[in-house]
Image (cartoon, rainbow, N blue to C red):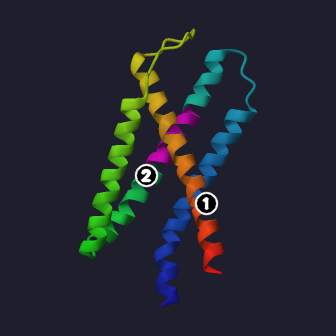
């Protein structure tokens, strides 16, 4: 059975290695350049940022794909997935509603929606950090109480 598992995980390992190598190459290109102008610097940095966006989207798709496949194996898992999706929608929607989106003074041309989006992402990040700290504390307390 181990041979089948190795054959199944091998393409994923190869894809992971390829993505890692491309990331390292782009990282080296961006941070070893010494551009003379701002325009020259933003060209390679934009490429690097688009690569990061691609990797984040890929991670999100894979993260969503596995629970979706597993959710259809039982009604309980499907119900948990639906509740999780609703919770995410409520959290993101609440962060969007709470985000002020007030413009700030900047020399760059920025659309008003970008401020709202940035504030929303900051609120979601704050909630995630708070959730991680609470989970860490809960785990420590629970482990201490069990002993």
Q: Residue at x 34, y 38 (%)?
A: 93
Residue 90 lies, with reference to residue 106, above or below; the image says below
Q: Reply yes or no: does residue 101 show up in magenta.
A: no
The image shows residue 53 at horizontal and vertical percentages of 49, 40
Residue receiving disc 2: 60
Numbered range of the magenta stretch: 47-57
Q: Residue at x 27, y 66 (%)?
A: 79
Q: Residue at x 28, y 76 (%)?
A: 73
Residue 20 lies, with reference to residue 47, above or below; the image says below
Q: Nearer the viewer, residue 55 or 89?
A: 89
Q: Label 2: how many residues lie within 10 Å, few (<14), some (14-19) or many (20+)? A: few
Dividing the picture into quadrants, the one containing residue 20 is bottom right
Q: Nearer the viewer, residue 62 or 101?
A: 101
Of the numbered discs 1 and 2, the one sitting upstream in the chain is 2
Q: Residue at x 50, y 73 (%)?
A: 9
The image shows residue 26 at horizontal and vertical percentages of 63, 41
Residue 62 placement, left or right of 39: left
Residue 15 placement, left or right of 85: right
The image shows residue 22 at horizontal and vertical percentages of 60, 48
Residue receiving disc 1: 136
The image shows residue 41 at horizontal and vertical percentages of 65, 23
Q: Nearer the viewer, residue 82 or 139?
A: 139
Numbered disc total = 2
Q: Reply yes or no: does residue 53 show up in magenta.
A: yes
> Magenta residues: mostly which secondary structure?
helix
Give how far apart the Cα atoms at labels 1 and 2 are: 23 Å
Q: Label 1: how many residues lie within 10 Å, few (<14), some (14-19) or many (20+)? A: few
Dividing the picture into quadrants, the one containing residue 107 is top right
Q: Quadrant of the C terminus?
A: bottom right
Residue farthest to the left, as pictured: 75
Q: Secondary structure at mark 1?
A: helix
């Amino acid at each position: 059975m181990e041979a089948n598992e190795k054959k199944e995980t091998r393409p994923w390992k190869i894809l992971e290695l390829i993505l890692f190598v491309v990331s390292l190459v782009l990282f080296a290109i961006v941070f070893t350049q010494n551009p003379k102008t701002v325009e020259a610097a933003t060209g390679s940095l934009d490429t690097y940022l688009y690569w990061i966006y691609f990797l984040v989207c890929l991670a999100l798709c894979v993260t969503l794909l596995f629970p979706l496949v597993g959710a259809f194996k039982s009604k309980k898992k499907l119900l948990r997935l639906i509740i999780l999706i609703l919770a995410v929608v409520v959290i993101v929607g609440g962060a969007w509603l709470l985000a002020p989106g007030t413009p700030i003074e900047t020399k760059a041309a920025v659309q008003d929606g970008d401020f709202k989006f940035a504030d929303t992402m900051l609120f979601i990040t704050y909630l995630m950090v708070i959730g991680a700290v609470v989970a860490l504390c809960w785990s420590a307390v629970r482990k201490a109480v069990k002993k």
